[in-house]
Amino acid sequence: MTSLAIDNIGLLVTNDPTLGEGPLGIVRDTALVFEDDRVAAMGRPGPDTDRRFDAAGRCVIPGFVDSHTHLVFAGDRAEEFAARMAGQPYEAGGIRVTTEATRSAGTEELRELTAQRRMEAQRGGITHIEIKSGYGLDVPGERRLCEIAAEFTDDVTFLGAHVVPREYEGRADDYVDLVCGEMLASCAPLARWIDVFCEEGTFDADQSRAVLSAGRDAGLGLRVHGNQLGLGPGVRLAVEMDAASVDHCTYLDDTDIEALAAGHTVATYLPATEFSTRQPYPDTRRVIDAGVGVAIATNTNPGSSNTTSMSFCIALAVREMGMSVDEALLAATLGGARALRRDDVGCLAPGARADAIVLDAPSYLHLVYRAGVPLVGATFAAGREVWTSNPIPS
């Protein structure tokens, strides 16, 4: 067994209110001890700790849990982004552009691109990540993306129902049959989740229900893209089928909020998407005040949210979506864990996975107070230093 102590912590966020102050479970002037890949204890470490990291009075928070990403892709859509900034509306059809680029890319190229993005996310403090397929849209392509994603996470999501590919134009039901049949059979052994883009112009409620039902029958958990482009059935379908998460939630009416409040589905918000698409930011205040569990994720993808910065998403959620800093931090850590139905990440209580961020700041408030400044001084995942500006001596 190996041990590591993060010593001289000025302010520790545990996300466990039984361990410290308030909902964030704040503990001051302490240390955090890891044994192998787990949190072992808080308090001054003993002299027999194998390694030490001096936090020098800085703030330590749980690693960010990014519960919605499309990390495996090729191609660039910067011109599309610039056009939106000039006033062109966002349309989900750009997914097909990325599909063409991804299909054309070699497997090793896709693997290297994914590794670069994963490393970038770790530098920004993301210690656990969900990765979707969805840019293959045929059986071998979706299988390949799931295989690559599985090299980087155990939360792989099969998203064959991302959009109807060009070759199935006008034959959406036939494509749904493929997704629910041969494609699902090929991808399910590599995935933990199935997802569907339930939106006007992609898949309607009946098609989405068929995809989710087939995935559930194959032993996969359920996720839904819903209510991004307008009001629709996505949120209510997600709750009806007990999906772990419904993501985007840009447009919600009172019925949607009532359904979420009565169920167990987490409403996952993707603030960088509204930034990139210039859609209105959702009002999370109504949802939080109704008692709904919420998460924040990056939605890393080339078309509508080409960022791996959770800190950026937190700042947007506070500035534009009605969240407090405490609520946004919880949503980006423990909220993401709940959206993935995990209890081993998103907190720093004894027994949790040893995922932590040392901020180059005295408080987590600086994530918003100093928005845009790279404040992650070190990232620890499963008890291991995966990035730091000041490496621990061997």
Image (spheres, grey):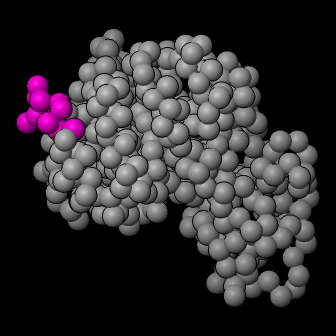
Nearer-the-camera pick, 259 or 36: 259
User: Does the rendering let one see residue 193?
Assistant: no
Look at the image and say whether residue 175 sits in the magenta stretch. yes
Residue 130 visible to the viewer: yes
Q: Residue at x 79, y 66 (%)?
A: 350
> Measuring 29% from the left and 14% from the top, which residue is drawn there?
88
Q: Depth check: give the residue in front, 263 or 123.
A: 263
353 magenta-colored: no
Image quadrant where one finds the C terminus: bottom right
Q: Quadrant of residue 255?
A: top right
Locate residue 329, reporting x and y percent.
69, 40
Image position of 82 with respect to 51: above or below: above
**How far from the left and from the top, in percent, is residue 14?**
79, 54
Q: Residue at x 89, y 62 (%)?
A: 30
User: Magenta span covers which residues?
Assistant: 167-176
Query: Residue 110's image quarter?
Result: bottom left
Horizontal side of residue 39 vs 11, given as left or right: left
Residue 45 x %, y %: 87, 76
Image quarter of the N terminus: bottom right
Residue 114 position, x and y percent, is: 35, 57
User: Which quarter of the picture shows residue 27?
Assistant: bottom right
Q: Magenta-highlighted stretch: main secondary structure?
A: helix
